[in-house]
């Protein structure tokens, strides 16, 4: 009896010590996280972080806590990096530590850690190396991809001619043409602009990007553990991505049916070759799940980002007709009116190059960046980030860093020009992020933006429906993405 009592007292003491030790461990680790507003139970920092303009909330917190701070998304601490210097020190100087992908609750259920963009560890390394290699061989940075873009731009110009200068919403004109460039690389074919299935895919991609950027999605990032059991927009987003996934699966089946390993036609074929080679390896990353989800990453990222940039870019150019005029002047001087633009022209067109950089800087397509994660216990700027801590590199705060850009909030192409009018690089231009996760499509996107802007402006001038001074360029929605206002404009044949 006495012995049993002593034993239970002893066990209780052990349990108490264990609990104190766990609590101490957690607070001591949290104590070394960067400073930030005090979270309240369950809600975290919901009171300080407004879900309808999360980026602005972060900028406010930066003023109070400095460029590196912690906020609680519900129960989960997230470290925010503001400004070019903090982002560079993390993503470049400590590239490996910060190379993990963080949680993205709104889409994680569709991907479950598979596919290039949302995977980690060995899987991510294998898929990234493979994808970069294949895209390069299909012409990324080479001749053939340039030709694909030029051909596709030609189809778009035909469409604009058909409209005969009537006002149009450019959204789907641009997304179809841009999407076809990536489609030709991953599916080995382009789609007719009138193809109903293709049009539906473009609508779904537009809808998904908007859904991901709504306040609801930001709320879901914080409280998904509870919200997942309730109805709401997140279910709509889930369904959209599942439908896009089904489309990719159907394309894989089409490839399989006519598969010839000695003659790979596209990204999917190259992946199928690897799958056949590794058939007997149960641990291979070359499986159907990674194929479908990586292809979805490329298809989605390859469509929405570039076409949003063009669409938002044309809005800026109608607001600043003097900039459009100067770009046209340069096109006229360097390319003339008889031949189509080539990638080699860019080096001779510093003004146009500067304008495109400035468009990307001002519109800031993914202001919060894509969440990262530290893959090991990490010391950073005197703080301690335990392995697995999520990190948001706020791309928008670098693109508007007052230390690097004279007029951070103004459209000012001279940000990228020196006194002699030569193109001037700026290290804080991180629209594609930096470090080990830097956008896989950077080279492709830069070619597309240059060739589309120049091909269109060579043949058409832009006319807005309201006086330029009245054009409102403030984004309509800002969350994961900055969504431009809905607008119409006229493409007038020159
Ligand atoms: C204007 C166009 C584009 C912009 C602004 C952009 C921006 C970004 C950003 C900010 C990231 C996150 C990097 C990070 O984790 O820190 C990213 C990742 C990625 N982008 Fe892009 N992107 C663009 C076009 C493209 C295109 C055309 C493709 C398709 C080839 C693409 C494919 C990807 C992929 C697969 C990732 C994930 C990389 C990884 O997790 O390792 N992007 N992009
Ligand atoms: C894109 O999707 C959003 C959200 O569903 C919608 O409001 C918008 O009208 C769409 N854009 C176009 C051009 O249809
Ligand atoms: C411009 O649009 C934004 C977002 O739609 C809106 O909040 C703002 O009031 C508008 N500004 C003007 C001057 O109309």
Image (cartoon, rainbow, N blue to C red):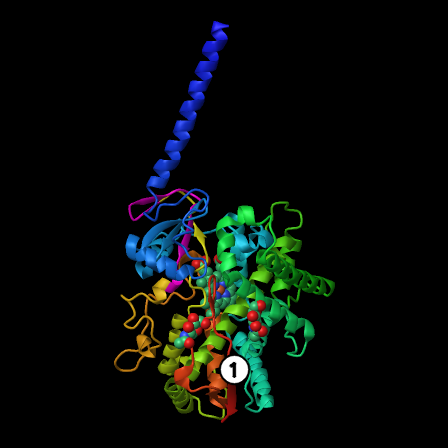
How packed mark 1 is, by other alpha carbons closer than 10 Å (few <14, some 14-19, many 20 or more), is: some
Q: Quadrant of residue 191?
A: bottom right
Instruction: Give the residue displayed 48% in from the left and 71% down from the top.
Output: 445
Q: Nearer the viewer, residue 412 or 137?
A: 412
Image location (x, y in percent) of residue 404: 29, 67
Instruction: Give the residue displayed 45% in from the left and 22% down from the top.
Output: 15
- Asked if residue 486 lies left or right of residue 263, the reply is left
Q: Nearer the viewer, residue 190 or 68?
A: 68
As displayed, is residue 19 above or below residue 447?
Answer: above
**Residue 390 is one of the magenta-drawn residues:** yes
Asked if residue 141 can be seen in this view, the reply is: no
Q: Nearer the viewer, residue 230 or 313?
A: 230
**Residue 65 is one of the magenta-drawn residues:** no
Instruction: Give the residue displayed 53% in from the left and 69% down from the top.
Output: 304
Q: Secondary structure at mark 1?
A: loop
Asked if residue 464 can be seen in this view, the reply is: yes
As displayed, is residue 52 above or below residue 328?
Answer: above
Residue lying farthest right?
A: 257
Q: Which residue is mark 1?
A: 488
Q: Quadrant of ligand 3?
A: bottom left
Which region of the structure is painted magenta?
A: 379-396
Image location (x, y in percent) of residue 486: 51, 76
Count every numbered label the image shows and give the total: 1
Q: Quadrant of residue 159?
A: bottom right
Image location (x, y in percent) of residue 377: 39, 42
- Asked if residue 222 lies left or right of residue 260, the reply is left
Instruction: Give the residue displayed 42% in from the left and 59% down from the top.
Output: 54
As displayed, is residue 116 above or below residue 361?
Answer: above
**Residue labelled 1 has its Cβ within 8 Å of some atom of ligand 2:** no
Q: Nearer the viewer, residue 224 or 298?
A: 224
Residue lying farthest left?
A: 419
């Amino acid at each position: 009896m006495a012995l049993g009592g002593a034993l239970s007292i002893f066990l209780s003491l052990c349990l108490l010590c264990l609990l104190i030790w766990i609590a101490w461990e957690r607070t001591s680790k949290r104590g070394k996280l960067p400073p930030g507003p005090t979270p309240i139970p369950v809600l975290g920092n919901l009171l300080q972080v407004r879900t309808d303009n999360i980026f602005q909330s972060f900028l406010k917190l930066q003023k109070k806590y400095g460029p590196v701070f912690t906020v609680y998304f519900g129960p989960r601490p997230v470290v925010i990096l503001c400004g070019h210097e903090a982002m560079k020190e993390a993503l470049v100087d400590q590239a490996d530590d910060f190379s993990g992908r963080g949680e993205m609750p709104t889409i994680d259920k569709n991907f479950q850690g598979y596919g290039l963009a949302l995977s980690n560890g060995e899987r991510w390394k294998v898929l990234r190396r493979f994808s970069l290699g294949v895209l390069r061989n299909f012409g990324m940075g080479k001749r053939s991809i340039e030709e694909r873009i030029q051909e596709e731009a030609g189809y778009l110009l035909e469409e604009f001619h058909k409209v005969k200068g009537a006002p149009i919403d450019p959204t789907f004109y641009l997304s179809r043409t841009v999407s076809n460039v990536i489609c030709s690389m991953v599916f080995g074919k382009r789609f007719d602009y009138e193809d109903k299935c293709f049009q539906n895919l473009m609508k779904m991609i537009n809808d998904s990007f908007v859904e991901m950027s709504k306040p609801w999605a930001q709320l879901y990032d914080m409280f998904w553990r509870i919200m997942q059991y309730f109805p709401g927009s997140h279910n709509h987003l889930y369904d959209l991505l599942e439908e896009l996934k089904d489309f990719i699966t159907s394309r894989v089946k089409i490839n399989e049916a006519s598969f010839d390993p000695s003659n790979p036609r596209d990204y999917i074929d190259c992946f199928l070759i690897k799958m056949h080679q590794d058939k007997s390896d149960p641990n291979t990353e070359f499986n159907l799940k990674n194929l479908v989800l990586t292809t979805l990453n490329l298809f989605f990222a390859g469509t929405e980002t570039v076409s949003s940039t063009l669409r938002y870019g044309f809005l800026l150019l109608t607001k600043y007709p003097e900039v459009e005029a100067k770009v046209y002047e340069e096109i006229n001087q360097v390319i003339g009116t008889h031949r189509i633009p080539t990638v080699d022209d860019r080096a001779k067109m510093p003004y146009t190059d500067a304008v495109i950089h400035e468009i990307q800087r001002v519109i800031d397509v993914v202001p919060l960046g894509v969440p990262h994660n530290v893959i090991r216990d990490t010391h950073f700027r005197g703080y301690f980030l335990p392995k697995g801590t999520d990190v948001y590199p706020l791309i928008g705060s670098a693109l508007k860093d007052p230390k690097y850009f004279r007029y951070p909030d103004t459209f000012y192409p001279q940000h990228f020009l020196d006194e002699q009018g030569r193109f001037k690089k700026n290290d804080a231009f991180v629209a594609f992020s930096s470090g080990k996760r830097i956008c896989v499509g950077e080279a492709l996107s830069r070619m597309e933006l240059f060739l589309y802007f120049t091909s269109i402006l060579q043949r058409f001038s832009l006319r807005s429906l309201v006086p330029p001074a009245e054009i409102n360029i403030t984004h309509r929605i800002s969350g994961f993405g900055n969504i431009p206002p809905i607008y119409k404009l006229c493409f007038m044949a020159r």
